[in-house]
Amino acid sequence: MMVDLWEGAGGSQPAWISRAPGRIFFSAYTPETGTELWTSNGSAFGTALVFEAVEGPSSAGLTGLTVAGSRLYFFATAAPSPTSLWALEWSGAVGDICFADYDTSGGLGVPDIFAFLSSWFALQPRADVDGNGAVAVPDIFAYLALWFAGC
């Protein structure tokens, strides 16, 4: 049984539950954090806030939590920035992994663009950078904007 994050009216409203080996990830609400990313191994001690995209009681608008390999991918809005794709290694330290590092080499380079385009031409869901549910030309522009910005 997990801990009740907020016993107030309406509860913590957990959503977007995604399983990983030994844990789950989910979005949940508390008055202190708003709706943010949480994890639990099923115990009260093992339940913790993982990521707070927006400090304080405002919410990050988390959607699309998906575990792939050892990473959790999700969309979040960290105002004033637009909604963007985030990732974290669920087996290690939590952090913002640069989505533009598409080949996950640890740095940005032209191979990342080719890796993205390969995924895009194969219509892989990971290439849906804008999160609208379709892999289309705007995703190329969204990815290149991330790449040129260096995340």
Image (cartoon, grey):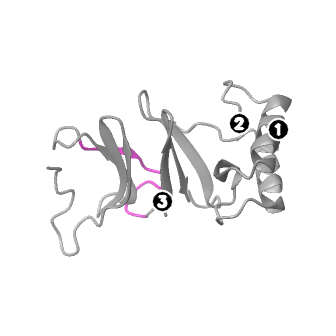
Q: Are marks 1 and 2 in contact (CB under 8 Å)?
A: yes
Marks 3 and 2: which is nearer the front?
2
Amino acid at the residue labelled 1: Ile
Quadrant of residue 132 within the rendered picture: bottom right
Seen at 44% across and 34% down, the residue is 94
Quadrant of residue 30 within the rendered picture: bottom left
Q: Mark 2 Cα within 10 Å, few/some/many (few <14, many 20+)? A: many
Q: Pick whichever, 151 or 14, lies toward us.
A: 14
Q: Which residue is mark 3?
A: 62
Q: Please say whether residue 108 is one of the residues in the magenta stretch.
A: no
In the rendered view, tell whether residue 118 sits above or below residue 70.
Answer: below
As measured in the structure, the alpha-carbon distance from the residue carrying label 3 to the one carrying label 2 is 21 Å
What is the number of the mark on residue 102? 2
Quadrant of residue 82 within the rendered picture: bottom right
In the displayed structure image, the side of residue 50 where residue 116 appears, left or right: right
In the displayed structure image, the side of residue 7 where residue 24 appears, left or right: right
Q: Mark 3 Cα within 10 Å, few/some/many (few <14, many 20+)? A: many
As measured in the structure, the alpha-carbon distance from the residue carrying label 1 to the one carrying label 2 is 7 Å
Q: Which residues are magenta?
A: 47-58
Q: Mark 1 Cα within 10 Å, few/some/many (few <14, many 20+)? A: some
Amino acid at the residue labelled 2: Tyr
In the displayed structure image, the side of residue 121 where residue 124 appears, left or right: left
Picture coordinates of residue 118, whole percent (x, y): 80, 41
Picture coordinates of residue 29, whole percent (x, y): 32, 62
Quadrant in which the C terminus appears: top right
Q: Which residue is mark 1?
A: 113
Seen at 24% across and 43% down, the residue is 47
